[in-house]
Amino acid sequence: MSVIAQEHVRGSNVFKDLSADDEDWQPTEIESLCMNCYQNGTTRLLLTKIPFFKEIIVSSFSCDQCRWSNTEIQSAGRIQEQGVRYTLRVSSKADLNREVVKMDSATTRIPELDFEIPPFTQKGALSTVEGLLDRAVAGLEQDQEARREADPEVADKIQVFLQKLKSLKSAEEAFTLVIEDPSGNSFVENPSAPLKDEALTVSWFRRSPREEKQLGLRADDEPDEDTAPPPGDDLETMRGEVLVFNTNCPECNAPASTNMKLVQIPHFKEAVIMATNCDVCGHRTNEVKSGGATEEKGTRITLRITSPSDMTRDLLKSETCAVLIPELDFELGMAALCGKFTTVEGLLTDIKDLVVAKNPFVGGDSGDASRVDKIQEFGRKIDDVVAGRTEVHLVLDDPAGNSYLENVYVPEADPEMTVETYERTFEQNEDLGLNDMKTENYQDDN
């Protein structure tokens, strides 16, 4: 591996914050080797953030000697705990302009054309839906001349397919775009955020052992079967004391420590609380995971918030739980927030932070005014709910049945809260890793 000399890096920091006020700021430039002519070229690095998503590194290489260029993106964060699957129904020109982050580990499918781009066959890209189509067309067209000489019949078939692929850019006929990424780092824009996107379905799934090997999370010679957790005294040890184990900070990757404790939630079940503190960058995370198995049925808890006193109710939101506020047309999908044991006010505050405070395009002039106003208005509505000025329904929909909301009237029934159980759908079982059948086979048969 070559070492980048300090004098080859122009700029005080490789990862600089984006700022509309800094007119002199430019992407960091690094002198690097051209893999086409093996002369020196220039790589430009830009760290940016996708709204309602996460940080990415945009890398652009150009060589003045042979004019070769290459652009790709990489995730600036870690591999997520679950894979993600985006299913977009493209029916208009506006859908073609949606921003898309497709990591190199993602599979792209268009079921109507029986078309698939396998993982690790393309570099990661920051583009649009139309840009993905253009990239697929360019990839198929580049070897057409050689195909016509070697096998004209195959070339003619590919040419017919290329016309079908190009016709999708007109948006005259609706089609489905599926991006499935086991790393969890791909993204498709929701232009209606923070409202639910009716054309876009986002689901999460557990990675298979084969996908973990592809991502480097499991050794190639490691058996596919997961080893059973050690029984017996270990569980009693977790109940009796706080366990500390070494890990790495998810922000700066410096060595850190994680504290873990198994606690009993009254009138519910056990949960594992984990807290990580980084002494280097100051980053802190608190996460809760259910200590029990997946329940036989899903659970939907609905609370009618009528007064500020409801803000103090204890709440356990598992990592598989979706949060809905129907009066605000708001829906937060499972895994958008990590599992946490908090209060109703704490959950609403986390939602506001996620949608408003942590959105890089709310401040400054980097976003359009209508979107900024809509997001800020949503934040004010959340404030009204917390202050008791607005009555809404808070819905915790957990297909794993591992979420909980305190009944303050116990042992009597809570007049403001309803708890329903329901049978999971095939897709929900697939997201929870409970199905043996592959999702794509199910979709093909239906």
Image: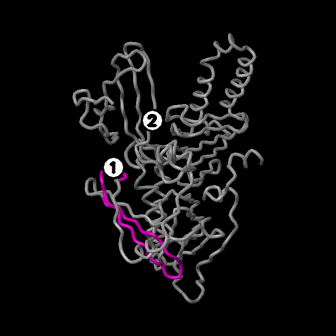
Taking the spot 48% from the left edge, 72% from the top edge, the residue there is 271
Q: What element carries label 1?
A: loop
Total number of numbered discs in the rendering = 2
**Residue 218 x, y percent position in the rendering:** 48, 48
| Magenta span includes 176 | no
Q: Quadrant of residue 400?
A: bottom right
Q: Nearer the viewer, residue 4 or 230?
A: 230
Residue nearer the viewer, 360 or 439: 439
Circle 2 sits on which residue? 73
Amino acid on which the number 2 mark rests in the picture: Ile
State the residue lying farthest toward the left.
7
Residue 241, x across and y down, in percent: 36, 75
Q: Mark 1 or mark 2, which is nearer to you?
A: 1
Please tell me the numbered disc located at residue 72: none
Q: Which of 334 and 391 is in front in this view?
A: 334
Which residue does the image show at 37% across and 61% down from the upper left? 285
Residue labelled with disc 1: 253
Q: Provide the residue span drawn in magenta.
A: 249-277
Q: Which colour scheme is used?
A: one colour
Magenta part, dominant SS: strand
Q: Quadrant of the N terminus?
A: top left
Q: Residues within 10 Å of mark 1 (few under 14, many from 20)?
A: some
User: As displayed, is residue 54 above or below residue 256?
Assistant: above
Q: Is residue 151 left or right of residue 323?
A: right
Q: Which image quadrant for residue 66?
A: top left
